[in-house]
Amino acid sequence: MKIILLSGLLFLSTVGMAQPKLLTQATITTLTNIIAPEDEDVSQIQNPSAGGFNFRNFGDGETKSTTYVKNDLVKTNYKSESFRGSMYRNNTTKITTTIFEIMGNKQGFYSSDNDQVEMVKRMDSMMRERAKTDTNVKVRSRSANFSNSIQYTNETKKIAGYNCKKALIITDKLIAKDTQAVWYTPEIKFAHLSSTGGTSGIANLGGQSANPFDKLDGFVMMYERNMPRGRKMEVKVSKIEIDKDIADKEFEIPKDVEIKSIKDMQGSGGGGFRFQRP
């Protein structure tokens, strides 16, 4: 009986040790690289006469992002050859504020989680209407709840000093299935952040959809993702600092930039997003 009791205590102790450490403060450096096909004809997707910024090529190439986490506040600064900006997330108020600097012009917008959900629904509705008259339009609802499943593997490696495990996330997109390889560390976790870089570092335009990374018991350190038009996204964390103090003023939104509601930044149809030229 004594042996059985000791074995049980040892098992519980091992399980407890395996739980990720919940961090409330950190500075995370991430590199995102979006690779376009070599034979892509960009003239078919550019529309300089429209008066707005074309986001279809937004983020191509390398983007370096630095994310600051402090309790319920998250801020990401990101920079590439074509743009730079910051995204502020308050997980208490559920408000996201994004500031862009493109072509020397700064603009900003804010949105609630409900605003982003409604925006995605409107875009889906517009696509369905277009599909009625245009057979080339493929309707793939982004507001639908896609089915995600995770397959864990025995592969391991070290990234930015953390021991990581590989998992495969399989997403059923109703019309096709997509498999994504993800490396995550079970050593640490954040309450409101499952990954950095990628779309989370490029304003996450299009709404707050369900994130399959949230199901992983740890923080995502690296992943690859297939994108529309043959693009490929590679994301990798290069550094995590957990002992560096972060001042509260880091999360203060600049007062020299006009911040509009995301509803005021949408196109005339109510579904697109427009960034005005200077």
Image (tube, rainbow, N blue to C red):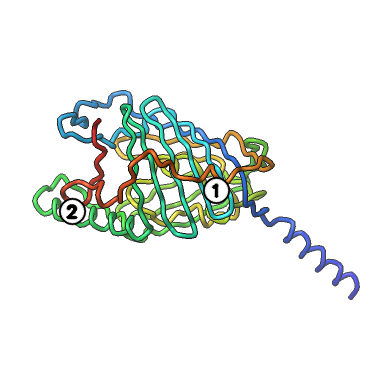
**Residue occupying the point 54% across, 55% down:** 72
The residue nearer to you, when weighing 136 against 67, is: 67
Q: CA distance from mark 2 to mark 1?
A: 35 Å
Residue 132 appears in the figure: yes
On screen, residue 189 versus residue 114, left or right, reads: right
Disc 1: CA contacts within 10 A as few (<14), some (14-19) or many (>=20): many
Residue 81 position, x and y percent, is 39, 24
- 126 w.r.t. 49: above or below: below
The crowd level at tag 2 (other Cα within 10 Å; few <14, some 14-19, many 20+) is: some
Displayed quadrant of residue 119:
bottom left
Residue 228 image label: none
Which residue, given by chain and number where applicable, does mark 1 sit on?
167
Image height of 5 relative to 35, above or below = below
Horizontal and vertical percent for residue 260? 30, 47
Q: Quadrant of the N terminus?
A: bottom right
For label 2, the SS is helix
Answer left or right for 233 relative to 40: right
Of the pair 217 and 138, the residue shown nearer to us: 217
Compare marks 2 and 1 and give the one earlier in the sequence. Answer: 2
- The quadrant in which residue 230 appears is top left
Q: Which residue is mark 2?
A: 126
What amino acid type should be assigned to the residue bearing mark 2?
A: Met
- Residue at the farthest front position: 255
Q: Amino acid at mark 1?
A: Ala
From this viewpoint, which residue is outermost toward the right? 2
Q: Position of residue 143 (x, y in %)?
A: 31, 58
